[in-house]
Amino acid sequence: MTYATLIYAVDDGILTLTLNRPDKLNAFTVEMANELVHAFNRASDDDAVRAIVVTGAGRAFCAGMDLGTGGNVFGLDEAQEPTVQDMQDRLDDPVMIEGVRDTGGRVTLAIYDCKKPVIAAINGAAVGIGATMTLAMDFRLASEKARIGFVFGRLGVVMEACSSWFLPRVVGLQQALEWTYSADIFDADEARRGGLVKSVLAPSTCWRRPMPWRASSPTTARPWQSP
């Protein structure tokens, strides 16, 4: 399958999944959400894929939701009035999926349910959904050029994509509250100190194999995605 907002490339068991709207700093759209859900479900069941690396094309990882689209940017149907019972019994109803459910949350749950290890290679700006989508991934690596922010307080909206559940479990409650209350954008070193990312790498650094889940194989260098 060909995607409009992603590059799906498998090489020797490693799927590199690239968010591919570089002219928009890979801003998130409903189309991207649907393609990400499909891509993670596809990779989860594909024996040719042994691990997944997620990164962004160009100089950003994902600059958050694309607020330049018309209408409800999340693609939701504001005329619907779902009940609590609907949320329990109708989550798989296409009407609920397309009109009610949290768009970013569907992506996060697809990542969480994926049977393959998922690594975020945060190569630049990662704010809003660009940050929260990484929380369900197994590892997060950041370029020195990465800038990360849970900026929902600036917009007067609640945290999305299951992030109020994941973030405290990744970095601890106190650190999660500090980042979300302040809504500041912070650098990769702050992300490492706070426990969000495992390591910070120079933009020219390569991530190398073999990896823990692989049997012995030749070490291959892959360029870090950066301008």
Image: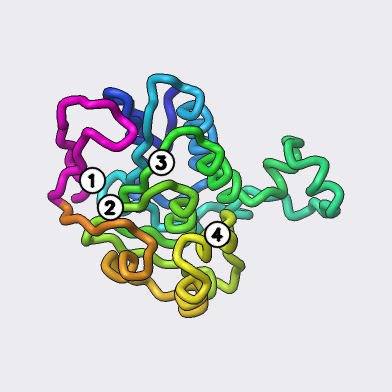
Q: Is residue 66 visible?
A: no
Q: Does the magenta run of residues contain 88?
A: no
3 or 4: tag closer to the N-terminus: 3
Residue type pointed to by label 2? Asn
Numbered label attached to residue 225: 1
Q: In the image, which residues are magenta?
A: 204-227
Which residue corresponds to the image point at 17% horizontal and 53% vertical from the top-left?
Answer: 203
Query: Label 1: few (<14), some or many (≥20) within 10 Å?
Result: many
Please give the residue where the numbered disc 4 appears in the rendered image. Answer: 163
State how far apart marks 3 and 4 are (Cα): 17 Å
Secondary structure at numbered mark 3: strand
Between the residue at mark 4 and the residue at mark 1, the CA separation in whole angstroms equals 25 Å
Q: Mark 3 and mark 2: span between their CA atoms?
A: 15 Å
Q: Is residue 105 placed above or below 89 in the rendered structure?
A: below
Cα distance between the residues tagged 2 and 4 = 20 Å
Q: Which mark is residue 41?
A: none
Asked whether residue 185 appears in the rendered view, the answer is yes
Q: Nearer the viewer, residue 74 or 202?
A: 202
What is the distance, in whole Å, between disc 1 and disc 3 at their CAs? 16 Å
Task: Establish if 162 lies above or below 156.
Answer: above
> Are discs 1 and 2 less than 8 Å apart at CB?
yes
| Vertical arrangement, residue 52 with respect to residue 156, above or below | above
Q: Where residue 108 sits: x, y (%)? A: 54, 47
Quadrant location, the N terminus = top left
Q: Which mark is residue 123?
A: 2
